[in-house]
Amino acid sequence: MSAVEPPAPTYSPTLPENVMRDGLLSLAQLEAVVYAGQAHSGFLPNGRRKGFFIGDGTGVGKGREISGIILDNMMQGRNKAVWISFNEGLIEDAKRDFSAIGGDPEKIFYQGKTKAGGEITRKDGILFTTYSTLRGGEKKQANDHGQSMGKTRAQQIMQWLGKDFDGVIAFDEAHSMGNAIAIKGKRGVRKPSQQAIAGINLQHELPHARVLYVSATGATEISNLRYADRLGLWGEGTAFADVNAFIENVSNGGIASMELISRDMKALGMYVSRSLSYDGVSYERLEHTLSDLQEDIYNELAGAWQVVLNNVEEALKITQAGSNGNAKSAALSQFWGAHQRFFNQIITAMQTPRVIDDIRHQLGAGNVAVIQLVNTNEAAQERIIAEATANNAALEDLDFTPRQLLIDYVRNGFPVAAYEESRDENGNVVYVPVRDSEGNQVFDREAIALRDSLLETLQQIRVPENPLDSIINSFGSDRVAEVTGRGRRFVQVRDDDGDLKIVEEKRGRNASMRDAEAFQNNKKDILIFSGAGGTGYSFHADNEAENQRKRIHYILQPGWQADKAVQGFGRTHRTNQAQEPHYVLPTTNLKAQKRFVSSIARRLDQLGALTRGQREATSQGIFTASDNLESQYASTALQNLFGDLYRGKTDLVFQDVTKQMGLNLLDEGGAQQNEHVYADQGEDDQYDSAENYANEAVDRAPERRVIKGLEEYVKAHIDNTRYIQILPQAGRLTANLPKGLNDAVREIRTVSQQPPEEAGKDSEPHKLGEELPEVGLSQSHHSECPHHADQHQRPEQSRCMFNDY
């Protein structure tokens, strides 16, 4: 991105003299003010005023940039502005930033203090609101008694501003509007969010407004840019007729096209994206090797889910729901969703003891620990408490482990609704829900008995402790600051006799703020934050804070969403810090964990491409290309691996592997359904990407070897030291793999020109784990291919007749 030059600046902002004299805005922040004013001076071909996007990274000072742009306009007579952000608590940050550059903080007021049906009485000022407020409004509906439809919050804002409003509307944390367009997936259409629609409507109704988008993580998918109407990326005067054409064409171009979007936006003067230097920031992967006990527990859990899957399939047969496409899809989708969440928690819990040991070491070295989580499982905790209260159970008897995720799925998601054969209006056989005489759903007694029996069995499985509770119980709540959304927690303390007991600790509205302050004041040396609690906080070694010790930032649970992960990284690396953080990514030797690491790695690549013009920019060395199991390399590896499994080229049995992974890859004639293996990936797909195959594999020996083979073959592509040669005359694909590559994929032979019955007759099955033969490329290929002449080139820069990376 730094190689792209923006247009020459022509706009001069109107700001108080001391802003420049006293350095209240840095040069980088002033640059954003200048280019925003320059963009806002022009109009799009459709007559709407041009917008501007600030994509600066966390810690650069986007609050001051927004304040500078609003103050610039106010000093030119535009006395009204709107500042939309993530939550109400951030209004204090907005007042602080506006005051810091010479503005009057009393001009900022919260929309939520005015009733939805009322009028805003302030004559001027900065209306601060949140996305959740923006999508709300009065609940009343129009009726035949003269009652009109209730006013929305967006309408309330528009009424206050007036239709000719030409001041600033700042969409802070603009990625909150990312889900702004209906996306068709394999399981139906994902509808746009109401807050995204409200934000777009606000832009449409006020065409002269100076729209400002602000986010360090503006988009992780190209469709997330739908809310940015004022950038002129589609429509009249562009190469794309509408937003759908824009999304389709850029998506087809892959991540390289996404990189070009942000670079072009900067070149056109509609985008800036700067980030803090990462000089001095260090990174580490902390791998935990599972103990024998943990392996036993994991295999027991994997076996339990295998039993659940078998029971689900049996229930689908009993109830005949398996003959109804929608019912079967819903049941399996619910199963795999619960399966995914469960093992995410289990793997996090299993690596937590290693993290606790490392924290002790770091505290002994004089450092402090910051731990990043995605969720606290508060919802499951509250269900357990409600059930215990009803049964008058003691707190010591409660089970707060991830087991509840599995129990909840079986109790609430197990297919027990009965279906029966019927015929549609065209005479086709269909299966529909069974209804009683009053139209109520009928449930199958046999399926219910199957579910209840399964619930009794699952109560006995061993499950590791909740990771959040494990850390708090290890160090004590007096040392651990918790910045999450939990309203209460249950912690271990010792009674007067020295025995452990469980006590309930209430956490009020300001508990997170008090804990964050205690950490920054050096009263606590460990801080845990979640996605729900960490927004708007700073945990860095601030020069103005008492606690200036080095932050060891553990990314214990990176989660699924790249924007939230990056926001989390930025909590400990900000301006005005005494020393840089050290990031630690805990992992285990479980191959199934690749599924979770891969998900965030892919999204970070896309986020970097769309916001920084470079795919590696947002992962900051924490994740690498080999972590991504949804790349073109992984798709090729997956295709060849399952192809060879099907043709008997390995010592594993295709049917056994696919059954244990819950996959159906054969048609009615027993032929392999290739489209199920190498279909294009989508974020809603459960079965069609390499990462999901990893997720569906349990950690027993055959499946572990399959994932290991897949992982090593992906790495073989990424490392740029193994090459693929297509021999058209033989119609087969061969890979040059090194000797001694344990548990890797065997020599790949895809015989495309032979009949199926002849395929594989020229070689013996390879046993995964045996040494592979070395297969060389022809000398002519090496001499003619510029990629092989210069092995240090990036794969995507190389082109030859054999490779199209």
Image (spheres, helix red, strand yellow):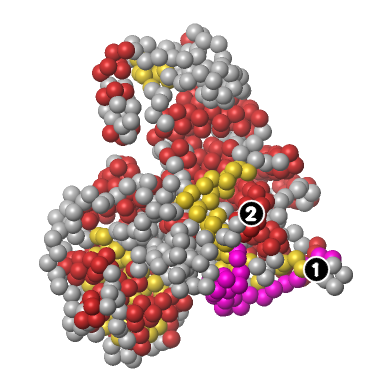
Q: Quadrant of residue 393?
A: bottom right
- Label 2 sits on residue: 361
Residue at 58%, 74% (x, y): give it.
518
Q: Which residue is mark 1?
A: 494
Where does residue 559 sit, x and y in percent of width and height? Answer: 52, 53
- List the single residue furthest toward the top: 762
User: Would you call the spot at circle 1 few (<14 residues within 10 Å), some (14-19), or many (20 or more)?
Assistant: few
Of the two numbered discs 1 and 2 on the same chain, state the one appearing first in sequence: 2
**Residue 50 to residue 268: above or below:** below
Q: Looking at the picture, how far across and down is residue 398, in whole percent?
A: 77, 62
Horizontally, residue 447 falls left or right of residue 392, namely left
Relative to the observer, which residue lies in front, 210 or 18?
A: 18
- What's drawn in magenta, residue-wise? 499-526
Q: How far across and how far down the image is residue 636, in percent?
A: 42, 29
Q: Is residue 630 visible?
A: no
Look at 34% across and 58% down and name the residue there: 275
Give the left or right position of residue 536, taking residue 342 as reference.
Answer: left
Above/below status of 219 relative to 672 = below
Regarding residue 69, the answer to whether it shows in the image is: yes
Between disc 1 and disc 2, the foreground one is 2
Mark 1 residue type? Arg
Magenta span has 778? no
Q: CA distance from mark 1 to mark 2?
A: 25 Å
Element carrying mark 2: helix
- Residue in the picture at 53% in, 64% down: 549
Question: Three-letter amino acid code at disc 2?
Answer: His
* Residue furthest right as drawn: 497
Q: Is residue 522 magenta?
A: yes
Front-most of residues 308 and 792:
792
